[in-house]
Structures are given as structure tokens and as C-alpha cells.
Amino acid sequence: MSTSHSIKAKAFLKDGKYAEWHDATFWGVRTKRDNMAFGLDEWEQLREKASAIKRHTISHLDEYLEQFAVNAEANGAIVHWAADAAEFNKIVYGILSGHNVRKVVKSKSMLTEECEMNPYLEKRGIEVVETDLGERIIQLKGQKPSHIVMPATHLSHDEVGELFEEKGISDEIGNHDPTYLTYRARLSLRNEFLTAEAGMTGGNFGIATTGDIVVCTNEGNADMSTACPKLHIAAVGLEKIIPDYDCLAVFQRLLARSGTGQPTTTYTSHFRKARCNDGEFHIVLVDNGRSSWIADPDHWEALKCIRCGECMNTCPVYRRSGGYSYSYFIPGPIGINLGMLRNPQEHSGNVSACTLCNSCQSVCPVKIDLGDQVYKWRQKLAEYGTASKSKKMMCDTMSRAFGSESRYNTATGAAHLLNNMPHGLVHCGLNPWAEGHEMMKFPKKPFHKVFEDLEKEDKE
Amino acid sequence: MKVGLFIPCYVDAVYPEVGVACWRLLRHLGLEVDYPAGQTCCGQPMANAGFEDKAVPLARKFEEKFAGFDYIVAPSVSCVAFVRLNYERLLAGHPCATAAKAMDIVEFLHDVVRPAGPLGRFPHKVSLHNSCHGVRELGLSSPSEQHIAPFNKIKDLLSLVEGIEVVEPERKDECCGFGGMFSVEETAVSAQMGLDKLRRHIATGAEYITGPDCACLMHMAGVAKKQGLDIGFKHVVEILAAGL
């Protein structure tokens, strides 16, 4: 009855000490988030408002996209529309090669990850340098993000120290002090900022009334990426557009508090125009499935996501299985759902990674019904041909037993016989419950039999 | 007021004493209670596993068995939540009376019966297990994620028990890792969550773990026994009815 997630999760948990650290680290972020959220009396109203704004915007997206594009172009930005990942990559490469760019510095963007832009550009001779520290670390290590906001948190500072030594970024061998390592990373990145011919950013928000792109970082690397090179390309998913600055104020109060437990990100950068007279500012609006997901009555609200990552931090399964146990590049509750929207055949193995505890939808700053959506995906696995045969058999058997009183009475009446069976036989590989549990002892009489005595007792 | 007692399949088969405690407590409070014969399962295990269609005949049967009651009361928050939140959809096109009437026994006692006087006597320290579906689907307590005025209906009721000391573990409403089919599909994570939860309950110094859902207790009891951890388990109702 295993799934792709459960197999990887089991391997993850083999290193108990690491697993415990991983759980405690992300629970720590949840705790920081709680402290921030509980500091605002209007927190729940903000969540409600944010959800309402997103529902409104997504269901009127055509109007807001048009308004955004018109205003951005009026500001002098060059707006591109990409139907899918392939077109997005082609557009970006076209802009870069048209400017003879050999190196591009970029700030964090899950969209470029989604479109697998870096390998596409690198194959065509363009060096891509990630400038968010976490992203830079995993880029140097040849890994993918294990979390959408804290992509390298799965690594220890010793691992980062050794990596920096190997790549020649730090020169004091054995000095793995985080402050030192950050200092060395800064020196190394400074050189990249100064020698790159283009900068790329994502976009946390696009403001329809002004055509602005808003990028939230803690390291100021989006500003560095756009202040040094003359060419700026912003990659923005269609769902990132919001109506106006009043709406931004709502999200701005929720995003960092939810994501990292900070009152705000250290830098909130607003981009309206190219940086100087000879610069260029390109905005690539990317669909890549989003417009069709709006039509899905069960799952369209996944598009409300502002990528704070808090559903991962609160998810008891994510914390105990790590980002790499999920097949989609976005892990955790939102990743399960977005992966299924992307390709259900490929990502059905993640829907088991949920106890339906609903902590995710209780914590989500835009109130996405994340757990309810996982429940709904499970109902569709048979249709996708990815339902577990043994699980189906088990449910068929249960359904038959529960559907017939005589079968049910026989089964519950005889259950106590299991108590006397040899331990090894009951606790064998065929009984997955016995992997983590000792079997329960069944009473001689189930309640419906005991009840006959209770009734007699009552009459006496 | 006619109360129908719903004893879910696994409570029937594994924890008859919890059914007995429900019966005794409700009768003690002077309520007219009936336990309709032939009841089995609400269908939740199959539906949560992704086979909602297998739950439909059981929902129909449930409707039949529990027709005519003012309240349908059960000692299992997740079964009640399943009936309340899903039956109308599952029975689409047919009348559905049970969804609105199904109540967890803690919720029913707290909101409807409102016993004022002392209930049972239980001179022990207990650690309260706030089951997820009780917290986040039935609203038995304020979810730790939300910035709302704190409340806990289970604690309120347990305060009517003589001699009891009630504590909560660190991470007071983190999931214990049962999750129905989750426990046999994601065996490693489920067992780890159970173990982590047990350790936090045990760290309170409590002699017992108590909660409103026998499924969470059954899961934790199985993990505790496997790991050789020593702590007792009681459903909330068993404590409320202790010595009555």
C-alpha cells in the first residue's frame, strides 16, 4: 500500500536525529508565525479579506490582466505573454540573446523553477546565477529547493561550509560559522552582480492600477539584481495580479508574518520602469496551465496562493518527510494540490501525504481549502488510473462487511479470536498496521452485544 | 428530546466500554436514549481513502437507522464530522436529515445538555488530546492556528469531574498521525507522529491521555505498546461517567 511519497518518507525518517531536527526547525517557523499573527487583533479579518480579494481577482482575471498590461506598457515596460513553460523560456532567451547577455543574476522565483528556465538557458550558453542565499547554495550543490521560502534549510551550516570551500567561495577551511559563510557569499555574489548583463526577478504581486511589480526579499538581492544590470526581466504568473495598492496592503501584512514570522520582509521592492534611459524592463506574464485551472470548480482556489510556505511549516507530514519526498517541485499541502493540477498521473503519489488534519487550511493566510482539496483529489485517483489496488480491495471488503448486518456481526463477534493468534502471524508484513503498532486486543463482546445486557439491566 | 446513540464500527468492535460509558452518562443525565440495532459504519474510512462511492450505501443505511431522532450522538469526532460535512453531498437528490442532527457527545453535552452539577470522579492527572476533526471541523476548541478567543469545550466538561487535573501537551492540537488509511499507507510518518505525540503527552506527567476520538487513542495506544511507553488511555466520556 505504499506510494511514492510514503517510500521516500520512510527513508527520510531512517535518520532519526536529522528528522527530529527538521521537524523542530519548521515547527519553530510556525511558532514565530503564531507570535506575529497573534500580535494583530485583525488577523482573522485580514485572512478573510485576502481570500475575498483573491477570489474576486481570479474570477475577473481577464479584466485585471488587461488593465495591468495597459498600465505597465504606459510606464514603458515591455509586456510579453507566455502560454506555457516552453514559450516562457523562449521569450526569456530571446530577450537575453538579443542583448548578447552571457550572465544573468536572478532573485528567487518559483515560476522559473516551474518552467525549468535555468537549465534551458544554461544549455544555450547563458550563465544563470541565483542571488538569494538559499537558492545560491542549492544551485551550487546541484539540488532543487526543498521548501519554497527556505529552499536550503534542509542543509546544515557544515554542509554549506564544505560546499563553499569546494567552490572556492570561502578560504578559511573549517570555518563554518554562518556569519562568516554569509560574508563570503556576499563577496562572491557582489562580483556576480557587477559582471552580469541582465537581472531577473519574480513578482510577488502585480498591481493592475499602476502596472507595478512588487518583489519581497530579505536580502535585497532583487534590488541588486536590477540596480546593476540595465536589463530587467520579471517573470510573473497570471494569478499574481491584484487590483490595487489597497489590496497590496492586505497581502503585505500577511505574507511575511505567515511565511517567516517577520512583520514584513526586509525589502519590499516596487518596479515601475526601466532603471535608466538606456535600460529595459520586460514583464513576462505566464499562464502555463493557470487559466484552465480557474475552470476547475473543486481546485481553482489553489490559485489564491501567495507562496508564503506556511502550509509546509505547519504540516506534520511535511515536517517529518522533507521536501524531497514529494514528486512535485513544490512540496507540502499546496504542492500536493498544484502537482495534481499540473499532472495527476505523475503526482498522484503525493496525495497520501495528508492525515486530513486541516492545520494547513486553518493557517493559510488566503484561506485555501488545502485539506479539503486533497480529499477531493483522492476521489479522482480511480479516474486517473492511479488508485492503489490493494487500498481499493480493502475498501470494497469493508464496504461489503459494513453493508450487511450479518457479515458485520460475524466479523466483530469473531475479532477477539485474533487476540490468541501467534504474534508473528498477526504482526507480519501483510498487516501494515503492525509496522508501527502493536495490535489492539479485541473484547469478547462488541458493544452491540454488551448493549443487550445494558437493556436488561435497565429494565430490572 | 430523543437521542440516538451512534457507536461507530471500530468503537463497537474495540472499545465497547466507551459505548457503555456513553449510554450510562446519557441515562444518568435523564435523557431518552436509544441505540438503534444494526448500525455499522458511517463510511468515513472508505471516503477518506478516496472511495466515496463506497460510503453512499452506508450513508443511506445511516439515514434509515437514525430516522426520527432529535440528536444523533457519537463518541468519535471524525465520524460525526464526516456525517455532518459530507452526507448532504453523498445523498444528493435524496432527503438527508442526519447531517444536521449528528453531534459529537462532548459537543452535545456542552452545547445542548449543559450539565451544571458534578459528574464523575476521576482523581488523576490527564493530558488532553485535542483531535484534529474535533478542533478544526466541529469547533470543540479554538484551533492553535487562529487568532480567536481561546476556548475548549472538552476542558469545560472535564472541570465538572471531581479530583481531576487536566493538562495539555506542548503543540496542543498537532495531529497524532492516525488519519484512517493514512496509518496503513504512510506507515513510517504515521508511527513517527504517534510517537512524537505520545512523548509530548507523557512529558506533562499525566497518567492518562484523554480525547474525544477513540481512533486517535487506538492509534497512540498501538504505538505506545510497540514502543514500550507506559501511559493509560481513556475516552472523555469514560472520565465523565467514572463512578456514576
Image: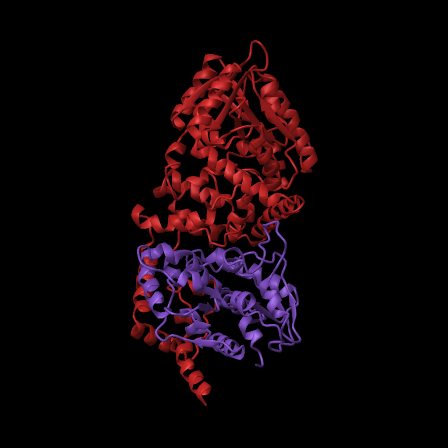
Within the image, what quadrant is residue A263 found in?
top right
**Which residue lies most toward the front here?**
B1
| Vertical relation: A199 (above or below) B114 | above
Residue at 65% over, 73% down: B164
Within the image, what quadrant is residue B54 found in?
bottom left
- Tell me which chain appears purple: B
**Which quarter shows the N terminus of chain A?**
bottom left
- The structure's colour scheme is by chain
The x and y percentages for residue A450 are 42, 81
| Vertical relation: A75 (above or below) A145 | above
| Vertical relation: A18 (above or below) A107 | below
Which is nearer the eye, A309 or A453? A453
Residue at 59% over, 12% down: A276
- Tell me which chain appears red: A
Count of number-bearing discs: 0
Which is nearer the eye, B62 or A101? B62
User: Does the image show residue A171?
Assistant: no
The x and y percentages for residue A3 are 39, 51
The x and y percentages for residue A212 are 55, 23
The x and y percentages for residue B13 are 41, 73
Which is nearer the eye, A451 or B72? B72
